[in-house]
Image (spheres, rainbow, N blue to C red):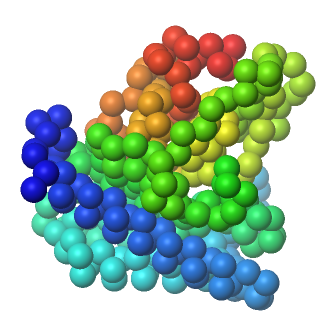
Amino acid sequence: MAEANPDLPVDPVTLADIEQLAVELAQLAAAEIQGALGTLLAIRYKGSDAGQNALRDPVSEVDQRVEKIIRMRLDERFPDHDIIGEEHDDRVGENHNFVWAVDPIDGTTNFVNGFPMFAAAIGVLWKGLPIAGATWCSTSHALRPGVYHARKGGSLRFEGQEVALIANPAVRRRLVGLPHVPEKGGSRDGRKTGSAAIEMAFVAAGLLDACRIETPNIWDVASGVALVQAAGGIAAVSRDDQWQTFERFEPCARTWKGAIMAGRADNLVDLKAVFS
């Protein structure tokens, strides 16, 4: 039996089970997403019928179906854990220490338009601390769909295999994920994918040097933070117009809001320098 690690909030066996279930749920979401590609989807929009928010946040029938299936599966395995999801009301559990943050499709605008850059993200928190994450991406460093996953104290993996990419020193201008299409200039080239979950996973995998996301919800980034940290990177959040090293989602996971950035940097100073 694996020995307990005092730095981990749960025992290694339970943590491994949680990671495995997160992977299974991400794969389940992937099957639904891939099965719906090329079909005529029912779509609604969260924004108002007029004004700047009109037609900004599409929701497909797949989003809602996937989240419902995920919630049923979690009921079977961890009935006392809580769930925060984008498409349905929270399920109130008996133990509020464990929270699963579920985004059935991140990058829905891409998805409903058939643009192949979207993800399904499953993040697991313990008292706001990311302890596991699984993000299925429609593409990857391996040029195929698959799940990036990790648990606290473990390594970043893709479909069960450890990810250990080495940056080519001949590449002088690396890529960063930015919230808006960037102007040319600076020391790095900016990219906008339309999916916060993909950008966080790509940072963890070393495909992006870093990313900055302006207004994410917790389900957009909970898995990604776990992945980045497992890959040896750090995350930072903006508080009172100051960037601070991320520690946990607080004061409340459901109401958490704030700009976030993440990168394979050694410290906050190095991470901030990526965007200077």
Q: Position of residue 237 (x, y in %)?
A: 47, 29
> Horizontally, is 254 left or right of 171 in the view?
left
Taking the spot 57% from the left edge, 80% from the top edge, the residue there is 31
Q: Is residue 254 visible?
A: no
150 in relation to 212, above or below: below
Q: Is residue 32 visible?
A: yes
In front of the other: 113 or 150:
150
Please state, as top left, top right, bottom left or bottom right, where the C terminus lies in the image. Answer: top right
Q: Position of residue 38 (x, y in %)?
A: 79, 84
In front of the other: 20 or 36:
20
Please state, as top left, top right, bottom left or bottom right, where the N terminus lies in the image. Answer: bottom left
161 in relation to 86, above or below: above
Taking the spot 41% from the left edge, 23% from the top edge, the residue there is 245
Q: Position of residue 127 (x, y in %)?
A: 22, 45
Kindly indicate the quadrant of the structure image that contains residue 7: top left
> Horizontally, is 194 left or right of 266 in the view?
right
> Horizontally, is 74 left or right of 208 in the view?
left
Q: Position of residue 101 (x, y in %)?
A: 39, 58
Taking the spot 78% from the left edge, 38% from the top edge, the residue there is 191
Kindly indicate the quadrant of the structure image that contains residue 117: bottom right
Count of number-bearing discs: 0
In front of the other: 100 or 155:
155
Taking the spot 17% from the left edge, 44% from the top edge, the residue there is 9
